[in-house]
Amino acid sequence: MIIDTHCHIYRSEMENADEIIKEAAKNDIHLILNGTDPQSNEEVLELSKRYENVHAALGYFYSFAEEITDEDISLLDNQLENNEVIAVGEIGIDYYHRKDNRDKQKELFEKMLDLAEKHDLPVIVHCRKAMQDTYDILKKHDVMGSMHCYQGSAEMAQEFVKLGFYMGIGGPITHNNNKKIRKTLKKIDISHMLVETDSPYLTPEEKRGEKNTPLNLKYIIRKLAEELDMTESQIMEITAENAKKLFKIKEH
Ligand SMILES: [Zn+2]
């Protein structure tokens, strides 16, 4: 079993979502689909009920910080009761794309973390140019989770690990120009790594120009094996165990 711990394979992002999910199932790939707003959360929930290899993460993304209402929050609160839901995500803060509404972003992030605590669920965190604020906010909450597409330093990764976090490793490690992330990787213990694609985004080097799919996880695993001097099956096995432990996914 391989687990793509972060992707967006639903119709509003990819027309052929059903096809991709079935293809992933044939390859024993489980998917954690991440919603970002009320509409995509609904899609994720529906797909997780329909397909055995789909697990739901529901949350509100920073880009909707101004739009999310109290009603939306209570809707999510109810949806998190569902058995298919294994995490609160994609949530987080991003000062690269939006500098103008930091307080609003932080406020929404805190509300998402409160819900994760209430429902005893791990979180899947997006963080861009906001490392210190993300860390400070997470530290105040009793949550574990994944730092999706981790791009920070090895030192900072250690701090997140102490809080109970895993580093999500994806397509950027295969990009020719991203030497920094490959250097950082070597200093993070494999016992705190997860693999993910962020499909349809962050396509690996091998498939540049195409929409990304979970089937491309193999390129990430291959690169990780190369960089860490381990076999691909070791990488697959250890990262799947990490994901199963964090998200409480059972083999059947
Ligand atoms: Zn994402």
Image (cartoon, helix red, strand yellow):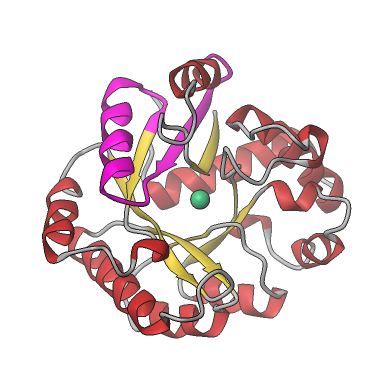
Say which residue appears at 70% left-offset and 75% top-offset.
153
Q: Of residues 243 and 153, which is closer to you in this image?
A: 153
Q: Of residues 2 and 209, which is closer to you in this image?
A: 209
Q: Position of residue 68 (x, y in %)?
A: 24, 63
Please tell me whether residue 214 is drawn above or below residue 244 in the rendered image. Answer: above
Q: Position of residue 114 (x, y in %)?
A: 23, 71
Does the magenta segment cover residue 227? Answer: no
Say which residue appears at 37% left-offset and 79% top-offset.
106
Q: Position of residue 83 (x, y in %)?
A: 21, 38
Say which residue appears at 43% left-offset and 67% top-offset.
92
- Horizontal side of 192 relative to 64 (left or right) equals right
- Horizontal side of 183 relative to 42 (left or right) equals right
Tell me if residue 250 can be seen: no
Q: Of residues 155 and 202, which is closer to you in this image?
A: 202
Say which residue appears at 35% left-offset and 62% top-offset.
64
Assign the C terminus to one quadrant of the image.
top left
Q: Of residues 118 and 209, which is closer to you in this image?
A: 209
Q: Quadrant of residue 158 in the image?
A: bottom right
Tell me if residue 129 can be seen: yes
Does the magenta segment cover residue 30? Answer: yes
Please tell me whether residue 67 is drawn above or below residue 24 in the rendered image. Answer: below
Q: Quadrant of residue 192 in the image?
A: bottom right
**Which range of residues does the magenta coloring cover?**
26-54
